[in-house]
Image (cartoon, helix red, strand yellow):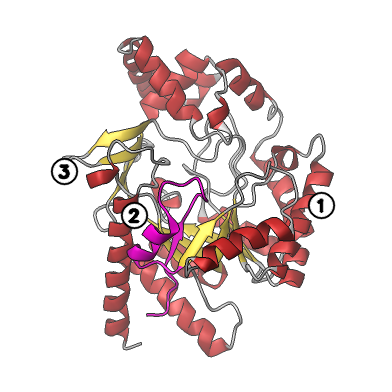
Amino acid sequence: MAIEQTWRWYGPSDRITLNDIKQTGATGIVTALHHIPNGEIWTVEEITKRKTMIEEAGLSWSVVESVPVHEDIKKQSGNWKTYTENYKTSIANLGKCGIETICYNFMPVLDWSRTNLNFEFNDGSLALIYQQKVFAAFDMFVLKRKGAENDYSEKIKTEAEAYFNSLDADGIETLTNTVIKGLPGAEESYTLEQFQAVLDEYAGIDDEKLRDHLQEFLRAIIPVAIEAGVRMAIHPDDPPWGLLGLPRVVSTLEDAKAIIATVDSISNGVTLCTGSWGAGHFNDLAIMAEELAPRINFAHLRNVQRDTDYNFREDYLFEGDVDIYSVLKSIITEEEKRKAQGRTDISIPVRPDHGNQMLGDIGQDNNPGYSLYGRMKGLAEIRGLELGIRRSLNI
């Protein structure tokens, strides 16, 4: 089997060790230098130190996830030009160290959003979910964002008010902490006032303006990536629709095509995240995988159950609404095409994305979605599916 199986690791502070990861069957590590503040340069020394640690464990550092894009770059404010130059230097340094794939995102403020981090399945495992009425309750009645009521249907507003009225003080605190958990640096304990101030900085930046900023960023960094032999892989919005009045520009197939067209190079690609794009009922991941295949530089595989009211629940790999079989088949087929074409970027590393908390992971201090056993289950299922697809295709 040719697909590189990888695993996201949060570094030396992760309770899941490199030796644990080896036992899952993964061979590649997906990690980042989380200790370096956003906007600062990743030096060759720091990159080498982490790479050596991984290699001494018998693994390889396959993908960076991620080199964060500073908020000033997204807003084109403050020191955004300096941060862009620093980003370019970090790309060049990663290339010098032989790390060829960088996953990154361009989501304003929040890296991801959920409303419950411990939803209990009927089998006793715990999953992440998003309910629009719950998020609206936070937005309208906890944060009290000006104009929030204009972003929701009458049905959702009614349900949100009823939900909010059912919460006690502890419930409100839990909801607030859950939403803010997706804010980079959330461990710093942002207050609601601080959170609103961060949102206010995006006043006047709509989808069109944010898209312009992304395109300018791409035109600055992709030539550096080409020179360094690095493939950039932008991650979709999670979830793929507007939240808290913030703009979104990586939510649909059309968005992805526009990004790819900005700089025509294999160094300008996407991370095919079936869970993030898949949360949107308007996205067909089988079609997206097929059409974006030549520019898929990295893939996250997980499934979701979703509806047309913008609710979704993370699910087991084969039990949600995303056609994982067709997605993985497109990835396998694309790798074979790249081999035949003599391309240098044959590999599309794949990692199991969020897994349910189960067995000994329950009650542990897990990064949301990144417990051990649920992802190990997902990786085993990916491995079996790949074998079946290859046998059926005789490759």
Relative vertical location of residue 192 with respect to residue 321 in this rendering, above or below: above
* Start-end of magenta stretch: 1-27
> Dividing the picture into quarters, in which one does residue 261 lie?
bottom right
Residue 196 placement (x, y as % from top left): 61, 20
Is residue 318 left or right of 185 when viewed as pictured? Answer: left
Relative vertical location of residue 147 with respect to residue 77 in this rendering, above or below: above
Where is the N terminus found, in terms of image quarters? bottom left
Residue 244 placement (x, y as % from top left): 54, 28
Q: Is residue 31 magenta?
A: no
Residue for badge 3: 123
Give the mark, 1 or 2, whose residue is nearer the N terminus. 1
Q: Amino acid at mark 2?
A: Arg
* Number of callouts: 3
Residue drawn at the location 53% of the way across and 68% of the way down: 55
Q: Amino acid at mark 3?
A: Asp
Is residue 359 left or right of 53 when viewed as pictured? Answer: left
In the depicted view, which residue is nearer to us: 30 or 266? 30
Q: Main secondary structure of the magenta part?
A: loop
Task: Residue 297: tell me if it is visible.
Answer: no
Give the mark, 3 or 1, whose residue is nearer the N terminus. 1
- Which label was assigned to residue 375? 2
